[in-house]
Image (tube, rainbow, N blue to C red):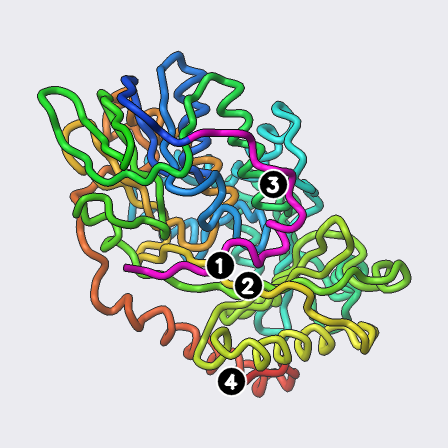
């Protein structure tokens, strides 16, 4: 069984508004649809179904936001992790890809709508997402990306070195790609706010109630917990990387877990905040082996990268590397700066790097593989899963429903090899362009 990272060590756990009062499931409950998993995907699905008039129960093993929804870095970047717009059209077909692209690129605006409608206190800021170019030839690839997103209606543009400096406060970028719809937030605060919204809409939310068994009984499903059961016409597994048990349904075999690193400094003094990241958006250094950062509402710099080799398990080494990179971009960071919070989470990676819908039987579906775009993707998936629950034809869904299948064996090492390859590629490009890269292990 997978061992998950500690939940109570994150900045978000220390600063988010308290979780709503809920209870565990005791006894038998009947409903139209049961959603299993209280992260963004499960919560937005439950809200959407309830708004469409369905009786909905949401079953959560711990508390709302316990999984990746409460541990991520808080970036809300409405793009796709690796696939290009052209790749998606080839893979899904023009019509289906168009539906998915529209939803994903609107993911941050959808989150903003949830936050406004339900008055969710989660430090929401929508000042944009900037992916920088550390060497000149990188600008060419970013320009193609900027053009492709602009072509589908996103507020996407290229900026030069002067504008990159004005926004970020660092002179390291040759320019970059600015996606003005990007945002950032307190991710656990958002999840807890969605949980309150679900309860407000009439969703019956049970926590501390892990599903132990799912069995088909006639035309219905019976989902059993330690102290109760749910009888439903349909159910949706939305547990992502935090799937455990599930009575051998095999959902946990559809992906491989990757563990991002997130750390938060002490609050920056006002004079530093005026110079360091003055536009208060999200910045990505533009490399495959990424380093990204933003502020929280207290003025802490929240930085993230992916675990790789010694980076991650060796906490002190990782903190040193994180600080070296931060100071490489911003020499004015005070020497007294420290990492007050350090944590890791889990995300569900699979080869296509877009969400996958798997049929578990008549009236049963699993959704996994958000692949590192949790906030906008989990937010926009609610509508897709609600469409499925209302029997929308597969050809009209924004994602295809597939047979349950295991992640290929190469996913155990492929993402790591990709990160090493990205390092090599960036290193060669920087040598050719005679540009400097940030410190690397």
- The label on residue 428 is 4
- Cα distance between the residues tagged 1 and 2: 8 Å
Specify whether residue 18 is painted magenta.
yes
Determine contact: label 1, label 2, CB under 8 Å.
yes
Q: Rate crowding at label 3 as few (under 14), some (14 to 19) or many (20 or more) other CA atoms within 10 Å.
A: many
| Residue 98 visible at all | no
Q: Where, by quadrant of the figure, is residue 389 drawn?
A: top left
* Residue at which label 3 appears: 189
Q: Main SS type for the magenta part?
A: loop
Q: Where, by quadrant of the figure, is residue 96 drawn?
A: top left
Specify whether residue 36 is painted magenta.
no
Q: Where, by quadrant of the figure, is residue 381 drawn?
A: top left
Q: Which residue is drawn at 30% across and 18% down?
A: 31
- Front of the two marks 3 and 4: 3
Determine contact: label 3, label 1, CB under 8 Å.
no
**Location of residue 348 with respect to 138 vertically, above or below:** above
| Residue 418 visible at all | yes
- Front of the two marks 2 and 4: 2
* Residue at which label 2 appears: 343
Which x, y percent locates residue 275? 85, 63
- Cα distance between the residues tagged 3 and 1: 17 Å
- Which one is in front, 152 or 36? 36
């Amino acid at each position: 069984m997978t061992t998950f990272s500690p939940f109570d060590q994150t900045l978000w756990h220390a600063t988010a508004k308290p979780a709503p009062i809920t209870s565990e499931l005791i006894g038998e409950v009947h409903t139209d649809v049961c959603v299993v998993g209280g992260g963004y995907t499960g919560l937005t699905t439950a809200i959407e179904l309830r708004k469409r008039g369905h009786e909905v129960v949401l079953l959560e093993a711990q508390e709302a936001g316990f999984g990746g929804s409460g541990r991520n870095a808080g970036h809300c970047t409405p793009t796709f992790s690796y696939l290009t717009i052209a790749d998606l059209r080839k893979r899904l077909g023009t019509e289906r890809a168009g539906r998915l692209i529209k939803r994903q690129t609107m993911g941050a605006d959808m989150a903003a709508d949830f936050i406004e409608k339900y008055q969710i206190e989660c430090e929401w800021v929508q000042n944009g997402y900037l992916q920088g170019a550390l060497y000149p030839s990188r600008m060419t690839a970013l320009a193609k990306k900027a053009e492709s997103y602009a072509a589908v209606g996103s507020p996407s543009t290229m900026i030069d070195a002067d504008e990159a400096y004005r926004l970020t406060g660092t002179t390291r970028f040759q320019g970059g790609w600015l996606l003005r719809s990007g945002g950032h937030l307190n991710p656990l605060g958002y999840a807890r706010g969605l949980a309150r919204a679900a309860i407000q809409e009439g969703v019956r939310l049970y926590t501390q109630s892990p599903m132990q068994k799912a069995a088909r009984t006639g035309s219905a499903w019976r989902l059993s917990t330690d102290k109760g059961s749910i009888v439903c016409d349909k159910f949706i597994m939305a547990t992502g990387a935090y799937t455990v048990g599930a009575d051998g349904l095999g959902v946990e075999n559809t992906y491989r877990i990757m563990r991002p690193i997130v750390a938060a400094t002490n609050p920056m003094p006002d004079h530093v905040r005026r110079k360091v990241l003055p536009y208060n958006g999200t910045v990505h250094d533009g490399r495959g082996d990424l380093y990204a950062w933003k502020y929280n509402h207290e003025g802490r710099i929240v930085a993230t990268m992916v675990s790789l080799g010694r980076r991650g398990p060796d906490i002190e080494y990782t903190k040193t590397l994180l600080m070296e990179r931060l100071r490489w971009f911003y020499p004015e960071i005070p020497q007294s700066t420290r990492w007050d919070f350090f944590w890791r989470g889990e995300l569900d990676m699979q080869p296509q790097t877009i969400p996958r819908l798997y049929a578990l039987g008549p009236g049963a579906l699993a959704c996994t593989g958000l692949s590192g775009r949790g906030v906008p993707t989990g937010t926009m998936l609610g509508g897709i899963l609600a469409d499925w629950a209302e029997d929308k034809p597969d050809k009209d869904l924004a994602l295809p429903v597939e047979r349950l299948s295991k992640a290929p064996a190469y996913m155990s090492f492929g993402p790591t090899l990709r990160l090493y390859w990205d390092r090599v590629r960036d290193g060669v490009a920087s040598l050719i362009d005679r540009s400097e890269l940030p410190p690397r292990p």
